[in-house]
Image (cartoon, helix red, strand yellow):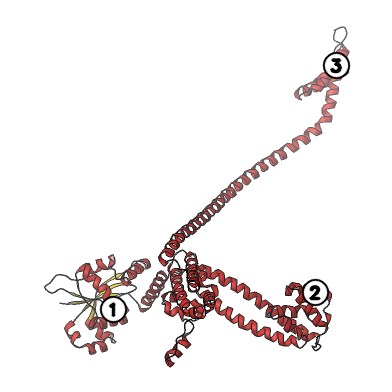
Amino acid sequence: MVLLHVLFEHAAGYALFAVKEVEEIGMLLPQVEESVLSIGKFNSMVSLAAFFPFKSAQAALENINAISEGVVHADLKLFLETNLPVSGKKKAVLGVSDAKIGATLQEELSFSIQTGGVVAEISRGIRLHFHSLVKGLTGQAASKAQLGLGHSYSRAKVKFNVNRVDNMIIQSIALLDQLDKDINTFSMRVREWYGYHFPELIKIVSDNSMYCRLAQLIGNRKELSEENLESLEEVVMDGAKAQAILDASRSSMGMDISPIDLINIERFSNRVVSLAAYRLELQEYLRSKMSQVAPNLAALIGEVVGARLISHAGSLTNLAKYPASTVQILGAEKALFRALKTRGNTPKYGLIFHSTFIGRAAAKNKGRISRYLANKCTIASRIDCFSEVPTSVFGDKLRAQVEERLSFYETGDVPRKNVDVMKEAVKEASDVAAEIKRKLEKKEKKRKKREKKLQELEENGEANGTAEVENGDADVTVVKKKKKQAAEEAPAEENGAEDTPAKKKKKRKAEEAEEAAPTDNGAEETDTPAKKKKKRKSETVAAEVEETPETPVTEKKKKKKKESAD
């Protein structure tokens, strides 16, 4: 009977392997290590007892998360209860590679668990030949499952927030330091180059950026006049200094310069001025980034010094892990190890020396205030690293504490207790966090409302489009009908227009016949052949006239003629 079963967790699913000749394997461990590499030898010792494939990638992720946390998932519990033999005098032993999940299985399912030793070697062999031991699973499919699960597991574990990236701060502060060096080097080059032509300007203007702007503005000193005084004042921001530059240009000892050299100097100074302007923009970007990532540290020690601490530590998380003693001498490692080697005095401060607090403290209190400041920096970095809603409330309170401690060293005023200050800070921070959350929820509601309106407008637009198409078809049919009717009525109107002169003639003849028919005596005249013809014509005309409808105008005319005849 097989007494040892080994549980193997794979990205494709759970597998339970039955191990044969367990006693011999336990006695001959070196031979086991050699036989693991050969699939033939390993297959004679280990056989697949059961396999439970994961239904989806989500199920695989849930199971691996449970295993990494040492929790028995429902799928694993069901798999083991179904496939692990329990009956018999001797209970089956379950080999598990991870001791943490083994202890949990022993508590929940009351299995006898074995970890390490021979189980580790067998697990190594199973990992190596897994796709050969499970039927229907290829090596390519197994590696794809491992890669997909690895990516999803990493995504779930590393909660990535774009607004809390400290890498941007590290790169920004490094670029800021490099720009400072480059601007100083280039400014010295402009001073040296333009100094051949106008050497007196170096003594009047000490600022590098301002000197480059003046070199760009003045150009040839001989062309400088009273008209340029206002533009000089705009650059220098001092009327006396602008007048001094004008006077110096008139009595300068510099050499003459060719137009080509002057063009090159102006172009180079323009580049230096643009670099100085970009440096200011970069500093503003760093300030905004620090307010998002580490607002408390920035409020306590300043944006630039805080960014240098994060950069030197490698990340905000690393800085939060450091103790206060390490933060105090961060950046002075060489001095520290030199002091330890020579058994001299260790440094009191590192990067935090650039803070204003240490510069304001007396010489005897510099070490004390640096220790206190490092302690507060550690607290601020931990709050920034692990708080959900970033606020600068704690940083402001910690800064006030450092100010109080500095005044205590100078005047002896007793500062407030840390407990009281932190209680105030917690209360204010909770209020600020609630306000920020409320604003975020309001923004989210507005965004959803806007999206809903846009969706409704799109739906209405589609409905209107279909209605317009239908109306358009109806309009087309109406227009077609009207055209058809017009086409039918047109020939009838033309015929009516053609018949009007003939009708008039017929009406005249009928009227003449009616006038000739009645006599004054009331007796009928004798019928001559000529009269008979006239009668026949008049009868036919009368018949035609009766068929054609008479207008009211013709009837009136007839009445008038009858009355005149009577």
Q: Residue at x 61, y 48 (%)?
A: 469
Disc 1 or disc 2, which is closer to the eye? 2
Q: Residues within 10 Å of mark 2 (few under 14, many from 20)?
A: some
Which residue does the numbered mark 3 point to in the structure image? 560
Q: Secondary structure at mark 2?
A: helix
Q: Residue at x 52, y 69 (%)?
A: 299
Q: Are marks 3 and 2 in contact (CB under 8 Å)?
A: no
Between discs 1 and 2, the one toward the N terminus = 1
Q: Could you tell whether 221 is left or right of 8 in the image?
A: right
- Could you tell me the amino acid type at mark 1? Leu
- Could you tell me the amino acid type at mark 2? Leu
On screen, residue 27 above or below 225: below
Task: Using the rendered image of the protein, determine whether residue 162 is visible from the camera's viewpoint.
Answer: no
Which residue does the numbered mark 2 point to in the structure image? 229
Furthest residue to the left?
89
Q: Residues within 10 Å of mark 3 (few under 14, many from 20)?
A: few
- Could you tell me the amino acid type at mark 3? Lys
